[in-house]
Image (cartoon, rainbow, N blue to C red):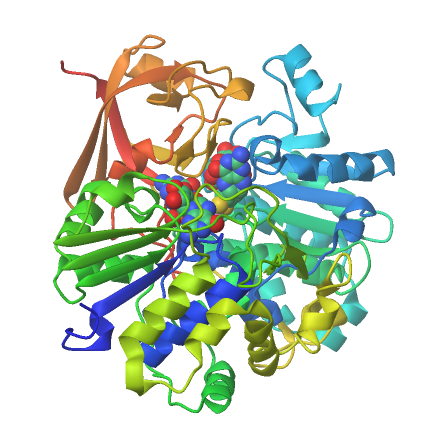
Amino acid sequence: ELNALASPDEAVFYTSGRATNEAAFLYQLFVRQFGTNNLPDCSNMCHESSGAALGQSVGIGKGTVTLKDLETAETILIIGQNPGTNHPRMLSSLQRAVEAGAEIIAINPMKEAGLTGFMHPQQVKGVLGMATPLAKQFMQVRANGDQALLKGIAKTLVEDGSIDREFISTHTLGFADYEAHLRSLDWSELERVSGISRSEIEKAARQCARGSRKVITCWAMGLTQHKNAVATIQEVVNIHLLLGAIGRESAGLCPVRGHSNVQGDRTMGVFEKMPAWFHDNLDREFSFQSPRHHGYDTVAAIKAMHEGRAKVFYALGGNFLQATPDTEYTAEALRRCSLTVHICTKLNRSHVITGRTGLILPCLGRSERDLDEKGAPQFLTVENSMSVVHASHGKLDPASPHLLSEPQIIARTAAATLKGRTSVPWLDLGRDYDLIRDRIERVVPGFEDFNNRVRKPGGFYLPNNARDLKWDTATGKANFATHPLSCVQPAEGQLVLQTFRSHDQFNTTVYGLNDRYRGIGNERRVVFMNPQDMKKRGLSPLQAVDMVSEHSGQTRVARRFLAVPYDMPSGSAAAYFPEANVLVPIDSFADVSLTPTSKSVLIRVSASAD
Ligand SMILES: Nc1nc2c(c(=O)[nH]1)N[C@H]1C(S)=C(S)[C@@H](COP(=O)(O)OP(=O)(O)OC[C@H]3O[C@@H](n4cnc5c(=O)[nH]c(N)nc54)[C@H](O)[C@@H]3O)O[C@H]1N2
Ligand SMILES: Nc1nc2c(c(=O)[nH]1)N[C@H]1C(S)=C(S)[C@@H](COP(=O)(O)OP(=O)(O)OC[C@H]3O[C@@H](n4cnc5c(=O)[nH]c(N)nc54)[C@H](O)[C@@H]3O)O[C@H]1N2
Ligand SMILES: [Mo]
């Protein structure tokens, strides 16, 4: 099927963030030797906005802090992130930080357990091992009101004179414009858009400026999945630049990641627009000419399949149908393909919405033992969100003796597809992961002596220039970004719906029907609403409602969700991903990063007709 295509660009190769470094490296090599950069990945729907923002502002698309920094910070902002459910191991680091004197400021429309109030104190204490909320200050921001709030913090710092002038003059560009912008902002506007009072915002700013300004900001999907996400994240960076709170101990930027190796996959070249130096290294190492024109990201790939410009869909893990926006549209896109292929550890719904031919290629999971031909155990590697590369050893008996590893499946697919068109010893690479690591070492900076260093306990750190006050930006400095204040604008009667995770799920894998910290049992088709917003619509608790998403004159409907009154700002609503993905318009995505706006879907809610 691949070789029958009119052009290699008619194939799309998706990656989910579980793939190991070795699998991801082989995969992108295969895809580029095949002749395309169509390498969309789950990052496109996740932290793409963070990568885009940080790249422009500080020259590296990832976080700048270590776990030790986190545990020794003085102030930690946690914005748009629900660690109690999604990053429970982070809670113990936060707890250590608080015990050492740190103050946590949480910014979220919802009072998430672990950060703030507890729905069921006894139970949560038992599970999280904590008696009191971690956050000293909680700001119940309006949906997408963060930019206004962050600008308010920056304005306070500037007007108080609580800024690090030496850092600003040595390391940054664009301060004068930014300062003028901040001074021109009107407090009543910032209060209205954020939903937070000036005094609360000033209090947060003054906390950040206290002590030796060891500030760390953590954020996740509550910032990344909005139309203005990149600008908002750059506002976070601006605050750190004002404070000089980057590139030194106990301070810095911490986008909190999702999948275990989403960071490593990007480092290995899974990206539809890798920089030229990466292509140069790849071409030199493997003696070929990789295509340089950019490929499709996730949204572009769905549209290409829908419009018949792409005909083969190949996935290294993930659940493309359910993770992407606009479920019905995406389903149709997949059905129009000639071939859909999934390398996977677990069956999911994507596997039953197929092209004319559908293949499921089950593979070993990372928890399973992976033996080489002589029966010796092999290991693979991953990069965690603190830029540490370490080994991953499977311990369990494989589910079946017939399972192949991801690198083996990719290597055999490449050998069978490329035949005489490649000089890469694919089958050897698929058999011996040390050989893949030798190649990675010669293509990707920071992996010198890879095979030796990764065998040491704990692995090794990748270089992080921003951490070392080296700015790989277009200007050679860290850049203040000055954006006009923006916020999603619902029309009269519309609500801003966010689609988020319950406690009993990992992305599209649902383990149970409870969301214990939010007090929901045995149901996922619920929509959380402000009690006043319910009253206005004549809705009683647990009444069945229909949600209609409105975008560019199109409507999308999700029927029979139960309305749950909840402590959240009026004008906002929340429902679970992936059930609510039918409402996320394919054409609604963030500026620059093109991340679907899964946290700001404009909807109308009314009592169910039937
Ligand atoms: N158990 C479990 N762990 C996981 C996952 C999982 O599904 N289950 N998924 C993994 C993955 S891939 C990722 S990316 C991470 C996701 O981790 P999170 O980003 O914590 O995941 P979400 O559930 O999407 O929660 C987003 C949070 O942002 C808040 N929020 C929504 N809109 C706004 C807003 O406009 N402003 C602010 N300030 N906050 C807002 C929501 O109320 C919610 O608390 O978790 C990872 N870890
Ligand atoms: N509306 C809405 N949509 C969202 C989000 C949201 O908050 N709201 N969040 C977005 C985010 S942050 C993300 S990261 C994406 C996630 O998008 P995906 O990564 O595509 O989705 P997952 O549910 O994590 O994929 C789970 C599947 O991966 C396969 N799998 C698991 N482990 C392995 C492995 O080791 N190898 C292989 N080959 N396969 C494996 C299994 O078959 C499993 O069913 O969803 C995005 N979609
Ligand atoms: Mo994610």
Residue 572 picture location, percent across and down: 40, 30
What residue sits 44% from the left and 81% below the top? 425
Q: Nearer the viewer, residue 93 or 310?
A: 310
Q: Is residue 463 found left or right of 269 in the rendered image? A: right
Q: Nearer the viewer, residue 382 or 358?
A: 358
Ligand 2 shown in quarter: top left
Residue 253 picture location, percent across and down: 66, 56
As displayed, is residue 426 above or below residue 331?
below
Residue 217 picture location, percent across and down: 66, 49
What residue sits 50% from the left and 68% below the top? 431
As displayed, is residue 341 above or below residue 528?
below
The answer to which quarter of the image holds residue 451 is bottom right
Q: Nearer the viewer, residue 401 or 515?
A: 401
As displayed, is residue 513 above or below residue 453?
above
Q: Is residue 139 found left or right of 557 in the rendered image? A: right
As displayed, is residue 442 above or below residue 417?
below
Quarter holding the N terminus is bottom left
Is residue 458 something one can see in this rendering? yes
Q: Nearer the viewer, residue 313 or 299?
A: 313
Q: Is residue 203 found left or right of 85 in the rendered image? A: right
Is residue 486 something one can see in this rendering? no
The answer to which quarter of the image holds residue 181 is bottom right
What residue sits 16% from the left and 38% below the top? 555
Residue 481 picture location, percent across and down: 55, 66
Quarter holding the C terminus is top left
